[in-house]
Amino acid sequence: MYPTARCPNWCCNPASTLRTINLTEFSAFNPAAREFPVNNLLLYAIVVLIWGSTWAAIPYQLGVVAPEVSVAYRFGLAAITLYFFALISRRKLAVPSHTLPIIFLQGALLFCINYFFVYYGTARITSGLVAVVFTMILPLNAVFDRLFFGTRIDKRLSIAAVLGIGGILMIFWPEVASLSLADRTVSGIGLVLIATTIASLGNMCAVLNTRRELPVIAVNAHAMAFASILALLISSGLDRPFNFSATTGYVLSLLYLAIFGSAVAFGCYLALIRRIGSARAAYSSLMFPVVALLMSTLFENYHWTPVATVGILLTLAGNWLILSGHRKST
């Protein structure tokens, strides 16, 4: 039996002092009839820390192996990881047949086509600028949530979005200010914006799947398997060579992106969507560049500027607004 966890006042009934938190409610691992002491903040932290570091790993996937093939490898390995985890933990992988089209669409949008454009864009602009552009998933999720599910865009979320996006622009202001209108830069930004839009639509598929109360492990495993197969088919249609790079950088980055950046992080992220809504979950994207910057401080001797410091404070303030909100937005 897993231990119980004390729940903060904003995520449960204030009248309750002790609550058993079920993994089926929000956990990335969603087993039947089991419990696990995790909460929104822990899931949020896992997503931020892992995805905040994946931007540095993606460039190692570019070069020798075609982006479409690398995406196929990444999510094929991620699917195998989830299937293996489900097998050893005796979790059910069966889902109703009528849900498979949406699961396939989630895989195509969130785990396949979206990443094609992320990889294309990363080859043209810096990873910092990619992270800045990808923060547009926050307003996109809010708009699509409103369009498809009628979810109201509350004032707290709007204020947090302004603070967060403003903070990110301040943090990366040198890159933004030196932005060139050269064809390669503009096309890179355009490709990442396309990726962000597709990812947001994939989030809407995930919202629908969570509303159907489908287990996250099963959905992600099947969706990633579909995505890998689709990526292979597209690669074949584009005449991409099915090669592999045995270099240390490629192999280690592939393992990290597949296991942690996909199998683990997407599980936690989709669990967050179930718990706090897609718009609030997407706010984690504003923390990815912050994590990348902190890593740069530790390993690359990055020097903080007053503007970047203010930007960090604004982003943290936005995170406080998001995580201290108690009303679920989906």
Image (spheres, grey):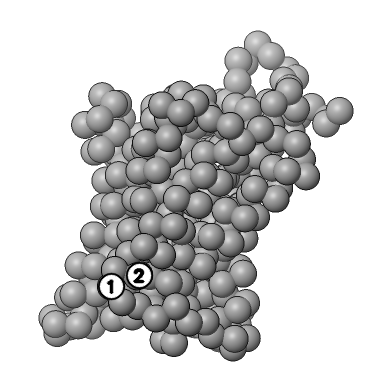
64 relative to 142 in the view: left or right: right
- Drawn side of residue 66 relative to residue 30, left or right: left
Q: Secondary structure at mark 2?
A: helix
Callouts 1 and 2 close, C-beta under 8 Å: yes
Residue found 44% across the figure and 78% down from its top: 242
Give the crowd class for mark 1: few <14, some 14-19, many >=20 residues within 10 Å.
Answer: few
Q: Which mark is residue 98?
A: none
Find numbered disc 1 in the image and state the secondary structure of the residue it sits on: loop
Where is mark 2, residue-wise? 235
Q: Which residue is identified by label 1? A: 238
User: Image quadrant of residue 141?
Assistant: top left
Image height check: is 330 above or below 285?
above
* Image location of residue 266, percent across then percent down: 52, 49
Give the image location of residue 277, x and y in percent. 43, 33
Image coordinates for residue 104, horizontal then vertical, percent: 40, 43
Residue 128 visible at all:
no
Number of residue marks: 2
Instruction: Look at 20% across and 67% down and name the residue there.
Output: 190
